[in-house]
Image (cartoon, grey):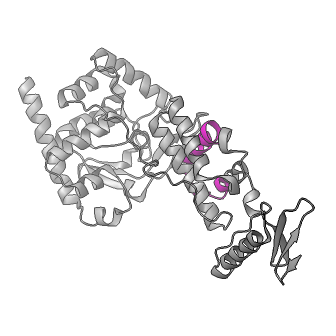
Amino acid sequence: MGRSRWGSVRKLPSGKFQARYCVDLIWHNAPSTFRTKREADAYLAAVRADIDRGSWIDPDAGKVTFSEYSSRWLAERPQLRPRTRELYAGQLRLHILPVLGSVELGEISPSRIRTWRADLISAGKPGASTTAKCYRLVHAVLATAVEDGIILRNPCMIRGASAERPAERPIATIAQVFEIADAIAPQFRAAVLLATFCGLRLGEIRALRRRHLDLSRVTIRIEEQFQELTDGTLVLGPPKTDAGVRTVAIPNVILPELEHHLASVPAGPDRLLFTTTSGEPLRRATLYTAWQRAIEAVGLTGLRFHDLRHTGNTLAAATGASTKELMSRMGHSSSRAALIYQHATQDRDKVIADSLSSMIMEHQSAGS
């Protein structure tokens, strides 16, 4: 048997050789035996080199299962928004843990990741967008495992697997937007117009209060949004990113519509602009039921409420607004957020709103 202060090789009764080594007073066995002593010595030399470079990973650390580690990963991220946490938990439960949950982190190889993803794609469920989201989540969990020194490198190495390529959503015309506004229940007419011509998200619309609507300056302030969890719980919080907190200029032409809606809202700065008949925060299902009836009535089945925001963004772009101005108006964020928002100004946003007003008035004149 060969032996040094930190490693040893011994011959087994089977004729094969076993290598072991000591790090921080803890002895570790090589993951497999070797045909010759030379191979065992070479293994120890490689381990020694990793230790000297600071790249050695404790093989026992990787014995935690993906299920155990991902559960801890979620628990250690209190900053996650409730809806995001719920989505991550659902992706893990439905699409990730059934295959990878019982596998130890040290055993998750690039090949195993490729097989897991290929099986999701071939099954056709979930869709391509959700598959990309699941891959991103697995990548993020394992990236943290690398940072924690549990595994040496991230096995998620599939180029382009994180990218989502959703199908292009439909865009409504100005005429169709007003057809929907005419067809929908009156209490939601203003919501249709705000979603389109101010580019508001549904969660932002549901959190609007009287104090957010400044008719004298013709602006609307976005500070909060309602998130609705699967169990029906409503969570009020800030927009998803800092860029989502913004003041949006309102096209003058829809101002009378908003004044009319405001007249139906009880007095008080904190009164919600859109509620249930009992005055409670508006539920998604309530609006979606009214929306479905409206789009069926005007023959636009398949158009989603969120497509109004996409429509508004497209119309704003048609005014000649720059990408930075559009990103500011719509509350978008990215890794280059500072560059995007640095040069966007409220004055320019007012120009965009005025241009939208002109487009709407031209449509209304043509229809009269």
In which quadrant of the rendered image does the N terminus lie?
bottom right
In the rendered image, residue 109, in percent from the top left (x then y), is placed at: 62, 53
Q: Residue at x 84, y 62 (%)?
A: 16
Nearer to me, 289 or 301:
301
In which quadrant of the rendered image does the C terminus lie?
top left
Nearer to me, 345 or 212:
345
Asked which quadrant contains residue 141, the reply is bottom right
Nearer to me, 361 or 153:
153
The extreme right residue here reads 13
Q: Is residue 20 visible?
A: yes
Q: Is residue 87 visible?
A: no
Quick check: 77 left or right of 261?
right
In the rendered image, residue 98, in percent from the top left (x then y), is placed at: 67, 38
Q: Residue at x 83, y 83 (%)?
A: 4
Asked which quadrant contains residue 7, the reply is bottom right
Is residue 70 one of those drawn in magenta?
Answer: no
Quick check: 94 left or right of 337?
right
Span colored in magenta: 73-96
Q: Residue at x 61, y 61 (%)?
A: 144
Nearer to me, 123 or 243:
123
Is the stretch drawn in magenta largely helix, strand or loop? helix
Asked which quadrant contains residue 55, the reply is bottom right
In the rendered image, residue 294, in percent from the top left (x then y), is placed at: 33, 20
